Image: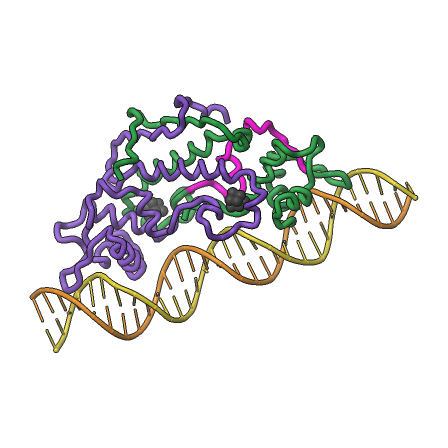
Chain colours: A purple, B green, C yellow, D orange
Amino acid sequence: MLRLSKKTDYGLLALQYLATDAPAGGASARAIAERYGIPAELLAKVLQHLARLGFVAAQKGVHGGYHLARPARTISLAEIVEAIDGPLAITACGRHEEPCEQFGACTVRDPLARIKDRITSVLQTMTLAELTDEEQTIPIVVRGRGEADARLEAR
Amino acid sequence: MLRLSKKTDYGLLALQYLATDAPAGGASARAIAERYGIPAELLAKVLQHLARLGFVAAQKGVHGGYHLARPARTISLAEIVEAIDGPLAITACGRHEEPCEQFGACTVRDPLARIKDRITSVLQTMTLAELTDEEQTIPIVVRGRGEADARLEAR
DNA sequence: TAATATAGGACTAATCAGGTCGGAGTTGGG
DNA sequence: CCCAACTCCGACCTGATTAGTCCTATATTA
Ligand code: SF4
Ligand code: SF4
């Protein structure tokens, strides 16, 4: 039902913590897990994954932990979701595996691809830094060629 | 990974067919399934569900089948997805079940809810009638208070 | 060296989507 | 009027994905 996984949810939580509330030297996986009530081993695995992809840097040892490896303002939600949940796609034909038996006869493929692009852009327009702001005005990027109009009433 | 279910995919395909290519009297579940190579019983179930919710009307008997019960222009993608996949939510806290252990300490709940609203609006702005058009200019509804700008480059 | 932290794999449990089955109801021809 | 064919309908089963656990190895510091 269009839901992002719990791992992503945890990852977002941890990254947002590292971006704003974390002490200077970073925070350990266990500390973050206890802070939010997340299963420690699971969050650890997510953070390991994020470390391998270069989002966070790890420091082993007694006072080790994780800290952001890139400025929060340069990390988009799309990147995070894609890193943890895999390439984001709303249909099976999104990435060129899973041949999808209906591919040839499918008549909704292209329109759905457009929908996917727009959802992607929604995720790209919000960065990790903005995730924490309470009052924010996040304009939506107009990707179509037409004027913006309020079509919501049409339903 | 933010994917909508195969059932929804099939449902969209069938509805789009009923909206445009179907013969006047409607089409049977079996006929549509064969047209697209979809497991017949599965599509049948999806159509049954859509019939119960008033999207299509069913006609039993020897020359029966389904036909759209509402004008295609008044059916938004959001409605269809919600009808088949359940209420659309990107997080566990989306609908007020699944208490989510982290609910109290969660610091990304509200921002994610905003993201969800925007994805919802993307789905609401496209109707079943527009799903089939090849050349279309679908403006995105600007829901924020600010100007639209191209922030895509920021990533 | 003891304690603490990440790294990484393998394993299990629970959930859910995708698919299948047999039955009930309707139609229409003989 | 009755039967046979066709359709919708609802419950059931199964394989795949996800969420979570466990254990061992490695690195760092007090
Ligand atoms: S090809 Fe059509 S049916 Fe197959 S996954 Fe893509 S949109 Fe869905
Ligand atoms: S409360 Fe926070 S952690 Fe729980 S589902 Fe909502 S966003 Fe995710």
**Image point 50% across, 27% down: which residue?**
A155
Residue at left offset 46%, top offset 34% = B123
Q: Is A29 inside the magenta-drawn segment?
A: no
Q: How many marks?
A: 0
Query: In this rendering, would A82 be left or right of D2?
Result: left
> Residue A58 versus residue B109: which sits nearer the camera?
A58
Percent of width and height locating residue B64:
73, 38
Residue A101: % across, % down: 57, 50
Q: Is A93 located above or below residue A144 in the figure?
A: below
Is B74 included in the stretch rendered in magenta? yes
Q: Is residue A28 above or below residue A118?
A: below
- Residue located 32% across and 27% down the image: B144
**A60 vs A132: above or below:** below
Q: Position of residue B51 (x, y in %)?
A: 63, 38
Residue B145 spot, x, y in % from top left: 30, 25
Horizontal side of B132 relative to B48 (left or right) equals left
Of residues B57 and A94, which is closer to you in this image?
A94
Q: Magenta residues? A: B66-89
Question: Would residue B92 be visible to someone looking at this image?
Answer: no
Query: Horizontally, is C22 left or right of A51 in the view?
Result: right
Instruction: Determine if residue B137 is in view.
Output: yes
Q: Quadrant of residue B67?
A: top right
Q: Nearer the viewer, residue B18 or B106?
A: B18
